[in-house]
Structures are given as C-alpha cells and as structure tokens.
Image: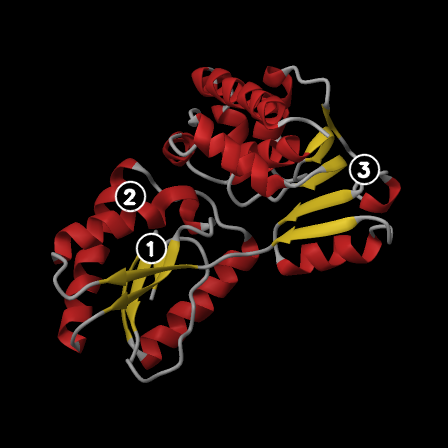
Amino acid sequence: MRSAGERVADVRRWLAAARQVYAARASLAVDLVTSTGLSAAGVELGFASLEREASDEELRRLAERAGDAAHVHVVLSANVFVAALRAVAFARAAAARVTVRPSPRDPVLARALVEAAGDDAVTLAGERDAATLEADVVHVYGRDETVAAVRARAPSSARVVGHGAGLGVALVTADARAEGAADALALDVVAFDQRGCLSPRVAIVLGSARRAAEIADALDASLARLAATVPRGALLPEERAEAARWRDVMAFGGTLRQAEGHAVAVGPAAGPLLVPPPGRHVL
C-alpha cells in the first residue's frame, strides 16, 4: 500500500521522462517512421499529443482510478505510439512493480520512456505469454481479439483489464461554420492516420442532405490541404484492402469524394452505417 503522495510522485517521474523523450524526439523519428508507418510529419504531429504536464489534482484522480496491486503487467498496442506513456503511468500509479510488453510492431517509444525514466520498479518484458508472469493484474491495450487471447492465457489468479478498440464519432451541429468544422475534424482525422480511438471515422451532420454534402466538400478540401504538409504514411495490407472495399461500397451506395490519401463519403440518412477503416476515411 502506497500513499496518494507516493503514487503521484511515481507518476511525475514518467512525465519528466516524457519531457526528456520529447526533447530528443528527432533521434527517434526515423525508427518511429519505420515502426508506425506514419510519415515523418505524421510522427512530429503525433508527438504533439505526448502528455508532458499534469496538475496535482489530475494525477490524484489518476491514482484513485488506478486501483491497488502488487504487480501490474502491461500489454501495449501499436495504434498510437504516444499512448505508451499513459498506459505505463496508469499501471505505475497502481503498483510498486510494473512489467511492460511493448508491441512487437512498435516498441520504440515504450523503450525510450523506460530508459529515460530510470525507474527500477518498471521493466520491459519480452515474453508474449502473460501466463508466465506473476502479475496479479494485467492491462491489455488493443483489439478485442487481443484482449480475449490474453485473458484466455492468463492464470486464474490474475485480473485482466481490457482496454479494447475505440471508435471516434464527431457531431457537426446545425450552426457550425462548414470550413471551421471541417478544419477541426480534418486535424483529428490526420493524427496518427486515424488509428487512434479519438480520431473520428464517422461525422453525424445535423441538418439536411445538402448540409451534409457541404460539410463533406469542406472536409475533402481540408484533408487535401493538410496532406500537403502532413502526408499519409503507409497502410498495412489489410487496411488497404478494407479501404478499397469501403470506397467501392460507398461509391455505389452513397456519394464519394476521394483522393490518393483520403476519402470522404456521404451515406443516406436512413441507410446502414458502414464505418470506414483507418487511413483518413470519413463517413
């Protein structure tokens, strides 16, 4: 059992590590482009979301929600590279011992943070099978299938906490200016090439079909402008295949505005909601 003050102090060490890593981000950029598939500008934009400051009250609430454990094992995903910080900080607030398994596809930032923090209570674990670790709590980040697989392998004595896939949905109100709403929406779509749960893939437009078309035109233009400074990175083969299917369906059943690096579709108001894949695709 640690006091609230001790937990906050432990997490503050990780915020300091984040500031150190952010200052040295240029040295990680090439590796992150390779591991994440983002463009160099996309990696730089992603670093803007790396949390580096927090108030005592924010950290106190984090510690309260984290719970209490002897050993937390963290299984990280590869969707948003800066998410490793909050995942480790949350586990560190809960436990005096933390082991971290970075995503094999994107381990760069997790390793850099662990090295910068110099926190003996947190170590990297290369073992995939959580059942071989003596953790009493396992935090799993990623797809629902990943959470289920870890839960199936974990020992019965361990509590598995799943942080599964999320879906971002934007609401464009009737009084919103089309250009302003589109610019704000585009920036969230471009971040991490839309792989994060806070990146909207669906926008609900209040108003008429004409209003929806107006927003779609403005979003198409905004995404094109952003692509000039933050080009889309490489998509995984399964992402490319899913994107091609989605574009074909929307071209047939809706109206589609598309470019090489993005697509915006307007679906019928009463039709099925066909959520697009990541990669700068918006319905």
Can I make out residue 82 in this image? no
Instruction: Give the amino acid type for the residue marked by disc 1 in the picture.
Output: His
- Mark 1 or mark 3: whose residue is earlier in sequence: 3
Query: Given the image, on which type of amino acid does mark 2 rest?
Result: Ala
**The N terminus appears in which quarter of the rendering?**
top right
**Quarter of the view holding residue 151:** bottom right
The local secondary structure at tag 1 comes to strand
Q: Nearer the viewer, mark 2 or mark 3?
A: 3
The mark nearer the N terminus, 2 or 3, is 3
Tag nearer the camera, 1 or 3? 3
At label 3, the amino acid type is: Glu
Instruction: Answer with left or right where residue 94 lies relative to residue 264.
Output: right
- Residue underneath mark 2: 227
At mark 2, the secondary structure is: helix
The residue depicted at 45 percent of the width and 33 percent of the height is 58
Q: Which residue is mark 3?
A: 127
The residue that disc 1 covers is 262
In three-dimensional space, the C-alpha distance between marks 2 and 3, rounded to whole angstroms, equals 39 Å
